[in-house]
Image (cartoon, rainbow, N blue to C red):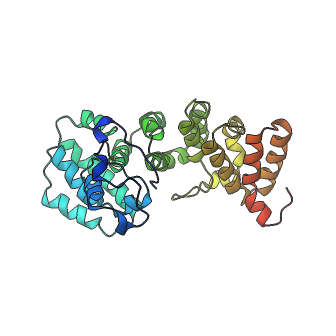
Amino acid sequence: MPKKSTSRSSESTVNPSATSNKPARRRSEVSPETLAALETGKLATRNLVEWLAMDQLRLFTHLLDDLKLEATPELEQELESLRSVGVMQKSWGLGSLLARYITQHPRHPVILEELTTHPSDAVRIWTMTAIQSPATLTLYQRLTAIRPFAADEHFGVRECAWMVVRPALINDLPQSIHRLLPWAKHKDANLRRFAMESIRPCGVWCAHASLLKEQPELALRILEQLRSDEARYVQLSVANWLNDSSKSQPEFVTSLCHRWLNESPTKETQWIVHHAQRTLRKRGVDS
């Protein structure tokens, strides 16, 4: 879910006087000016409060106007059917609608490419969903297409990036881990974090990966690569991965943490190991 962002390009810059200097802490505190900027696609959300306050359906309608696409009665009915669903289901639903209706645009491949850098984080999330929608895409094609979103400057876009591609990754774990290993070695911490977060055994806002819960060693190559990562963002993902695994395979996690402390006595590894065993400590398991 979106938490924090800065504007992606000069086009997304909004007059500071039109918005509050600090993000609102309650939906009722989101100013009308900020809300208008969000719902016309001129501003990215800065936290979850703004995300929840924004009317995504209104933003979608504005996007159609910008693209000169007509909102047909059928489309309006489908939009209305999304009004009462949860915020993530609404996002995925709007992405699917965009995939279907963008094909009416004579420049639809080019338009989709342009939308990957749209000022609105919500539009970029719909765009990644639209790009990922064809069932015929190979795993390589999916990862290639998701890469700019996995490296996006907006936390919410990055979080949705791994969620939208996770089903395909979990469906072929050996191939996925092979494909993700170069990401785990990348200089961009966002891509390194994606390599770990996208294959968490339990994950968040997504189905569990049964095979990884039973055989966590399948992900060892990525875990080993990131065991002393310098970025706290990545460290937390590794620790969360192992904490997930500790709930089904505590011996694997305990043994791995012991070995890491012996082989990699860095402050980064120590931090990861400590946070990885938090559930084990609560259960009174010796670490």
Above or below, 207 against 232 in this view is below
Find residue 42 and report its horizontal and vertical position in percent: 27, 47
Q: Is residue 38 left or right of residue 245?
A: left
In the image, is 58 to the left or to the right of 135? left
Question: Could you tell me which quadrant the C terminus lies in?
Answer: bottom right
User: At x 58% / y 47%, what residue is drawn?
Assistant: 197
Count of labels in the image: 0
**x%, y% of residue 55?**
29, 61
Q: Is residue 223 above or below residue 212?
A: above
Tell me where residue 85 appears, x and y as whole percent: 35, 67
Q: Measuring 86% from the left and 59% from the top, which residue is drawn there?
A: 286
Which image quadrant for residue 66? top left
The correct choice, above or below, for 90 with respect to 11 in the image is below
| Front-lying residue, 226 or 181 | 226
Residue 281 placement (x, y as % from top left): 79, 62
In this view, the residue in front, 61 or 212, is 61
Decide which of 221, 118 is in the foreground and name it: 118
Q: Is residue 91 left or right of residue 162?
A: left
